[in-house]
């Protein structure tokens, strides 16, 4: 097994590792070290059953069952399906607009995700159809803030929420794809707050922990002041842009650290008749500090 960097700043491809086979402790420990070093890891050419995807993910910790229950794979609730497929009646098989805005998975829960493992089951064959994902390092986002801004952020907590209707910054996706949350889902995912700057529990580096998708305000600041501060931070993130953009191939498994990266699906929902079907496990994390 070896690591081949994907970009100068972030990401590595892990070569010569078949994840359908048991991974011994020594190899696993090297993979975990690489995960902390590179922030995102790519495993190409995998052929995984649902159980194998889940089993490898579990090596990193307990798995989340995503609160949007209607998008979980029947019989495998650890797997969130992200797909633009349609049923015969025209309704969606699963979430198609899940990741279009920059975010860190499950930052809207009290103990947000440690990491996600996204597996490409089916991707469009036409190279002109956008189906990429990109990642940005939130270590870099923090480290490139002016010192005066770093001081302003000390001790502040940001409010994160899942319900898109509570986030006026999000534009409609193709006018129709934004997901409406049921009253039950809203009740199970109330707003939570986390430090605006968190410390990664393993590397001890500081991270700018906000995203345009889930962060809607700053605790204990008047709304206008909180919104103005968030605007500045989102502009900073947008200026930096992505650090690595991935064009998926069937059989790719990408794993990323939600504690120090943001990511997004680039562009919009893949248009029919092209099909993009992904499945994701999400590893539980700890309360940010
Ligand atoms: C995600 O946000 O977890 C998925 C991103 C993608 O579908 O590219």
Image (spheres, rainbow, N blue to C red):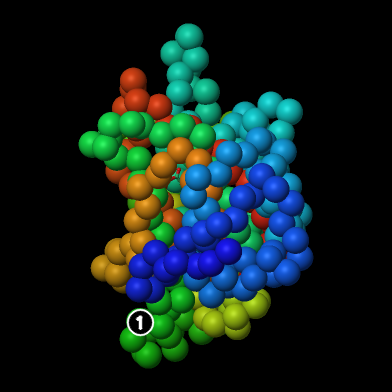
Rendered view: 72 above or below 154: above
Q: How many circles with numbers are drawn on the protein?
A: 1
- Quarter occupied by the C terminus: bottom right
Work out whether residue 195 or residue 125 is closer to the camera in this orientation and state it: 125
Query: Which residue is located at x 26 percent, y 37 percent?
Result: 127
In the displayed structure image, the side of residue 262 where residue 115 appears, left or right: right
Return the x and y of residue 221 as percentages of the image width and height.
48, 71
Q: Is residue 95 shown to the viewer in this render?
A: no
Element on which disc 1 rests: loop
Query: Which residue is located at x 45 percent, y 23 percent?
Result: 85
Query: Which residue is located at x 52 percent, y 23 percent?
Result: 93
Return the x and y of residue 224 as percentages of the image width and height.
37, 65
In the displayed structure image, the side of residue 230 where residue 67 appears, left or right: right
- Quarter occupied by the N terminus: bottom right
Query: Which residue is located at x 68 percent, y 52 percent?
Result: 57
Return the x and y of residue 153 as percentages of the image width and height.
46, 81
Q: How crowded is mark 1: few (under 14 residues within 10 Å), some or many (20 or more)?
A: some
Work out whether residue 235 or residue 100 is closer to the camera in this orientation and state it: 100
Work out whether residue 40 or residue 289 is closer to the camera in this orientation and state it: 40
Q: Is residue 85 shown to the viewer in this render?
A: yes
Circle 1 residue: 144
């Amino acid at each position: 097994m070896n690591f081949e960097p994907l970009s100068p700043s972030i990401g590595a491809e892990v070569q010569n590792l078949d994840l359908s086979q048991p991974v011994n402790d020594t190899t696993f420990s090297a993979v975990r070290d690489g995960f902390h070093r590179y922030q995102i890891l790519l495993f190409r050419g995998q052929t995984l059953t649902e159980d194998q995807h889940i089993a490898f993910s579990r090596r990193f910790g307990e798995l989340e069952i995503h609160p949007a229950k209607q998008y979980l794979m029947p019989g495998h609730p650890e797997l969130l399906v992200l797909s633009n497929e349609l049923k015969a009646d025209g309704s969606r098989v699963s979430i198609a607009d899940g990741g279009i805005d920059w975010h860190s998975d499950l930052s809207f829960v009290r103990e947000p995700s440690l990491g996600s493992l996204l597996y490409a089951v089916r991707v469009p064959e036409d190279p002109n159809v956008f189906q990429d994902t990109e990642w940005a390092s939130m270590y870099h986002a923090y480290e490139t803030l002016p010192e005066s801004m770093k001081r302003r952020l000390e001790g502040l907590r940001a409010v994160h929420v899942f319900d898109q209707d509570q986030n006026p910054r999000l534009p409609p996706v193709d006018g129709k794809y934004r997901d409406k949350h049921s009253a039950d889902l809203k009740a199970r995912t109330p707003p939570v707050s986390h430090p605006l700057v968190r410390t990664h529990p393993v590397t001890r580096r500081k991270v700018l922990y906000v995203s345009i998708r889930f962060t809607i305000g700053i605790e204990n600041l008047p709304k206008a002041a909180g919104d103005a501060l968030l605007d500045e931070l989102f502009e900073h993130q947008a200026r930096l842009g992505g650090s690595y953009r991935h064009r998926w191939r069937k059989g790719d498994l990408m794993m990323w650290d939600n504690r120090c990266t943001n990511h997004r699906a680039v562009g919009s929902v893949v248009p029919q008749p092209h099909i993009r079907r992904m499945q994701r496990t999400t590893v539980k994390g700890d309360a940010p500090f």
